[in-house]
Image: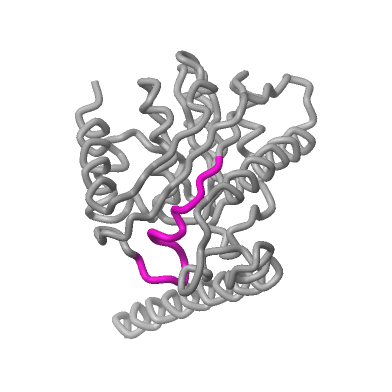
Amino acid sequence: MEPVYRPVIAAARGLFAFQGNDITRIGADNIPATGGAVMALNHIGYLDFAYGGFPAVDVHRLVRFMAKKEVFDHKVTGPLMRGMKHIPVDRAAGASAYREAVRALRNGELIGVFPEATISRSFELKDFKLGAVRMAQEAGVPILPMVVWGTQRVWTKDHPKSVGKRRHVPITVRVGPAIPVPADADTAAVTAQVKSAMAEMLHEVQQSYPTLTGDDLVYLPARLGGAAPTPERARELDSQEAADKIAKRRAKAAKAAAKAAKSKS
């Protein structure tokens, strides 16, 4: 029984239909009918998990995505994420999320993971974390490489969102053949294999996607003649964003400490 997930899927279908999204799914037959698997997905927009789950729905399965804890803390999205049994990840202490994901994989669930951890501003693949392959190895399940393209035009970092607007944005979701992770495999080597498979699929999907022009060039990688930041510039922006977040946390902590000290005096 999925009293939350099923209605959310229906609502998402309605929203995407209203927006005029043409969602092309390729390779859904690579998703196993039963049993656990890690679905490794590239990350170019805030709604990647919503679009990325559709191939699994096509074969009557559901994906439990690992997502940052802040999404679960939100008063609106939090209850929905918990109701859909997605897995919250506290980046400062991710061991519990890892254990929960491995347990779910062993119980036959599909677990969605973003190996890049954060959205790619360049829309190219960033460095991959090893966690996706490690949990697949520990649970004894394969990795399913996946890519999405077009989702960055709906809502991504540094750009206005167009959720709920009729923009007729085509979306492509592609699932590749499963990659096994033997118990004695080198996780770094398998991670590189997964990234290579995803890069090949992503480039093919990009080549077959409708040509972007004008204002939409900001959503196209510099490698393809677009106006998106280069990977090098994207790394600089990511570093600045991380530094700004640390500064804000420290300022907030200092303000709280000052307030506490004042109340004691």
Residue depicted at 60% across the width and 34% down the height: 145
Residue occupying image coordinates x 32% and y 60%: 167
Residue 177: image quadrant is top right
Name the residue at 24% across, 39% down: 8
Q: Choose between 87 and 179: the one closer to the eye.
A: 179
On the image, the x and y values in percent for residue 151 come to 44, 53
Q: Is residue 91 magenta?
A: no
First to last magenta residue range: 147-161
The x, y position of residue 247, in whole percent, is: 52, 78
Q: Please state if 180 lies on the left or on the right of 34 as rendered.
A: right
Q: Quadrant of residue 193?
A: top right
> The N terminus appears in which quarter of the rendering?
top left
Residue 157 in magenta stretch: yes
Q: Nearer the viewer, residue 107 or 207?
A: 207
- Judge from the rendering whether residue 105 lies leftward or rightward of residue 231; answer left or right: left
Q: Is residue 226 above or below residue 65?
A: below
* Of residues 72 and 145, the one drawn nearer to the viewer in this rendering: 145
Which colour style is shown? one colour
Residue in view at x 66 percent, y 55 percent? 126
Q: Is residue 25 above or below residue 14?
A: above
* Percent position of residue 143, x then y: 61, 28
Total tally of numbered discs in the picture: 0
Q: Quick check: 232 left or right of 103? A: right
Q: Is residue 228 left or right of residue 46?
A: right
In the rendered image, the residue lying farthest to the top is 34
Question: Which residue occupies the foreground of this view, 256 or 27?
Answer: 27
Is residue 119 positioned above or below 144 on the image? Answer: below
Say which quarter of the image contains residue 253.
bottom left
Quarter of the image where the C terminus is located: bottom left
Magenta span: chief secondary structure: loop
Q: Position of residue 91 (x, y in %)?
A: 53, 52
